[in-house]
Image (spheres, rainbow, N blue to C red):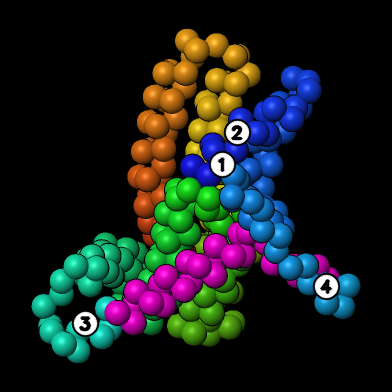
Amino acid sequence: MLSDSTTVVDTLQTSHTGSQDTGWIMHHILDSKELDLTPFGIIHLPEIHLFGFDISITKHVVFMWIAALILIITFIKVSNSYKKSLVPKGITNLVEVLIIFVRDEIAKPTIGSGYDKFLPYLLTVFFFILTCNFLGLLPYAATSTSNIAVTATLAGISFLVIQIGGIMKNGLIGYFKGLIPHGIPWWLTPIMFLVEILGLFTKPFALAIRLFANMTAGHIVILALLGLIFILRTYFVVPVSIAFALFIYLLEVLVALIQAYIFTMLSSLFIGMAYHQEH
């Protein structure tokens, strides 16, 4: 996100009209096939086309790979540290705190009995989203979770876990039968079944949009505040813009953690509702 602000001046200098001055914000927010390392240069990522589909590597893909690599290295280090000592230290202590938090404050209360079957997935999605969110706060980095395709994929995986968990516990027929509330008139059954089926798809939709919107909004606000300096072209607005941009940036650190928690908590809640249906 800070890398975006370093290229504000260069981008604005190439703009000729007021309407063009706003286009640079989306340029830095949206995905692209290059890594902008201004003033050091631009790295063009390879374009790959397979069977008519564009599967080119983009900057968001690159930072998802970086997030995955960071997690792999971190957890290998944590695993090895437990072989040497049962007393966690440093990064191992931090990781253990987060794991216990997800287990005791998210999985157990929302799923209940059988939570351990879904804990590996919840831990994976929590740490992945958290790492991607924090990477976006570094200079020259990008926030993969501000891409709707990424959040939709994560929500889609949660959707599959929710349905599979419900079917595992209640059976295929029992699960879909349990979607219909008991005690309603028989003639309302088809309507309620349709409503509940639609509700199954609105849950992952809400997960995807919530994460995407929150991780995108902060970036736009920061860039817009910094852009005011060059759009208004007056020194009086500089301290105000920088102060507010810094405040939003610090707030984004908190948002990065909160959004990882919310996505994991809601996924766990939906899993619990499907796994333990009311009969």
Q: Is residue 207 left or right of residue 249?
A: right
Callout 2: SS? helix
**N-terminal-most mark, 4 or 3:** 4
Q: Residue furthest right?
A: 52
| Residue 111 percent coordinates (x, y) | 35, 70
* Residue depicted at 38% across the width and 77% down the height: 73
- Residue type of the residue flagged with mark 4: His
**N-terminal-most mark, 1 or 3:** 1
Tag of residue 49: 4
- The reply to whether callout 4 and callout 2 are in contact (CB within 8 Å) is no
Give, as a single range, the part of the protein colored magenta: 53-77
| Mark 1 lies on residue | 4
* Above or below: residue 166 compared with residue 21: below
Tag of residue 81: 3
Q: CA distance from mark 4 to mark 2?
A: 32 Å
| Mark 2 lies on residue | 8
